Image (cartoon, helix red, strand yellow):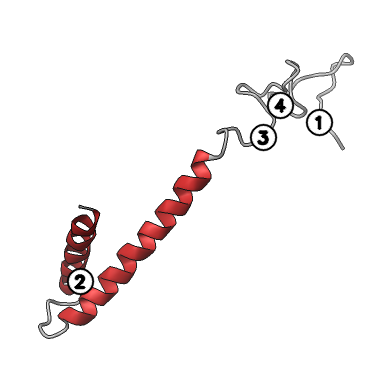
Amino acid sequence: MEDQDREHRIRERAYEIWERQGKADGHHERHWQEASSEIDGENSVSSVDHRETASTSGLASGLQPGGTSPGGGRAPGADSMGARDKSGKGVSGPN
């Protein structure tokens, strides 16, 4: 079944290429080869992406949702809303 799906996708892509290139006759082999290369390239990228996605936790860093650190406190630099220190001056963040 997978081979039939691949051939169907190649056939559709070759048709799109034929249309995009002005519907000129006599180039079906080139269109088929180009479509085949594109589909096979997409399939190989898709399988690599699937393997990488399956092995990750979904979090990009050690931060938990909401900008907190794993210990529960605010993450460094998480307060970007113009917090003020005890003297009333604006906090500019780490220098």
Percent across and percent down for residue 91 are 81, 26
Check disc 3 and report its element: helix, strand or loop: loop
Question: Which tag, 1 or 3, sits closer to the chain's start?
Answer: 3
Give the residue type that dot 2 points to: Arg
> Residue 92 bears which disc, if any?
1
Q: Nearer the viewer, mark 1 or mark 3?
A: 3
As measured in the structure, the alpha-carbon distance from the residue carrying label 4 to the one carrying label 1 is 12 Å
Percent across and percent down for residue 19 are 15, 71
Check disc 4 and report its element: helix, strand or loop: loop
Above or below: residue 51 compared with residue 82:
below
**On the image, numbered disc 4 is attached to which residue?**
78
**On the image, numbered disc 3 is attached to which residue?**
61
Question: Which tag, 2 or 4, sits closer to the chain's start?
Answer: 2
> Residue 43 bears which disc, if any?
none
Question: Which tag, 3 or 2, sits closer to the chain's start?
Answer: 2
At a point 74% along the width and 25% down the height, the residue shown is 75
Q: Nearer the viewer, mark 4 or mark 3?
A: 3
Residue at far bottom of view: 26
Q: Nearer the viewer, mark 2 or mark 4?
A: 2
Q: Nearer the viewer, mark 1 or mark 2?
A: 2
**On the image, numbered disc 2 is attached to which residue?**
20
Give the residue type that dot 4 points to: Ala
Q: Is residue 47 left or right of residue 16?
A: right
As measured in the structure, the alpha-carbon distance from the residue carrying label 1 to the one carrying label 3 is 24 Å
Q: Nearer the viewer, mark 4 or mark 1?
A: 4
Please state which of residues 62 and 45 is positioned toward the viewer in this rendering: 45
Q: Quadrant of the C terminus?
A: top right
Please state which of residues 31 and 54 is positioned toward the viewer in this rendering: 54
Question: Which tag, 1 or 2, sits closer to the chain's start?
Answer: 2
